[in-house]
Image: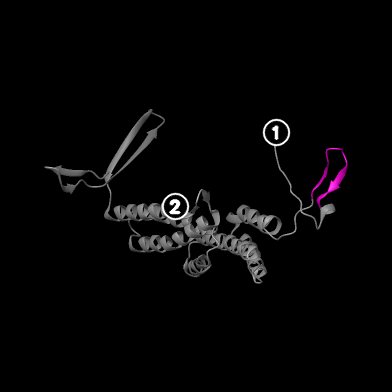
Amino acid sequence: LLAPLCADRKIVGFLRSYIIATSFDGKVGAYTLTVKAATEAYAKLTKIKSEFQAGMMAVQKGAMVGTDFDMDKYYNGLGELQAKFLDRYLQFVKENAQDSSAGEAKMLIRQTVSGMGNSAAPAIGAKLRALISKSEDKDLLGAANLALGQHLAKRYESAFQKKDAGASKFAKEAESVLQQTGKDFAGQSAQVAAALFDLTKLAVGRKAMEIEAEDIDGTKFKLSDYRGKVVVIDFWGDW
């Protein structure tokens, strides 16, 4: 808590920053309140987090186009912001490895890396590759490789929609990275499987999966029966 000390309407100083935590002992049914002064490093990390939140708000504002929200612009802007703050979090851990706040910074690093997979911004790939080449943290490496594969899949979709001749290169690389990640990092297997399914079955430009059903008259049909035609599929539910 930061509270200003005032005298005659002038701020003359600040109270120290404190960390307040509670724990519950089920055996005796009592809460324990722990209050300790925050370290200088923790105050620095708090400032970095506040700056990131401010940057994210600016990205959200920038993604508004009139009354519409441009999701691609948002994720690309957020990805670039995350890449910038990734360096700051990594540097923080390096400089404050012995401080208790380093654990929170490491968690923020993993969260940031995971979020970068949603962006097609070109700078993301280079940032993730650099992290992969330097890190010795297996969990972080798994998250970084997954994010790289997801990022490349986003690059493929973006390039395909722009009719870029090199779009297929991104798709092949994304599939290769994701498959290798599944082999090297068992903890990422479920997320890798989901990302590969999205890339190979649901991504823009991919061949649609076969659908077999009956129409309202009971006549059986297949989606492939309409190949070459514009088809609108409406998925709906009734509860």
Question: Can residue 217 be found in the magenta stretch?
Answer: yes
- Which residue shows up at 43% across the image and 53% down it? 56
- The image shows residue 205 at horizontal and vertical percentages of 70, 61
Toward which corner of the image does residue 160 lie, by quadrant?
bottom right
Toward which corner of the image does residue 220 lie, by quadrant?
top right
The extreme right residue here reads: 219
Q: Which residue is mark 2?
A: 61
- The image shows residue 107 at horizontal and vertical percentages of 44, 53
Question: Can residue 205 be found in the magenta stretch?
Answer: no
Q: Is residue 29 above or below residue 91?
A: above
Q: Is residue 231 above or below residue 145?
A: above
- The image shows residue 130 at horizontal and vertical percentages of 49, 69
In depth, the one of 35 and 152 nearer the eye is 152
In depth, the one of 26 and 139 nearer the eye is 139
Closer to the eye: label 2 or 1: 2
Type of amino acid under label 1: Asp
Say few, some or many: other residues with alpha carbon within 10 Å of mark 2 (under 14 / 14 to 19 / 20 or more): few
Q: Is residue 6 left or right of residue 105?
A: left
Pointer 2 or 1: first along the chain? 2
Toward which corner of the image does residue 142 lie, by quadrant?
bottom right
The extreme left residue here reads: 8
Q: Secondary structure at mark 2?
A: helix
Q: Is residue 236 left or right of residue 75?
A: right
Per the rendered image, the range of residues in magenta is 211-223
- The image shows residue 186 at horizontal and vertical percentages of 60, 57
Q: Secondary structure at mark 1?
A: loop
- Which residue shows up at 58% across the image and 54% down it? 187
Q: Which residue is mark 1?
A: 238
Q: CA distance from mark 2 to mark 1?
A: 36 Å
Say few, some or many: other residues with alpha carbon within 10 Å of mark 1 (under 14 / 14 to 19 / 20 or more): few
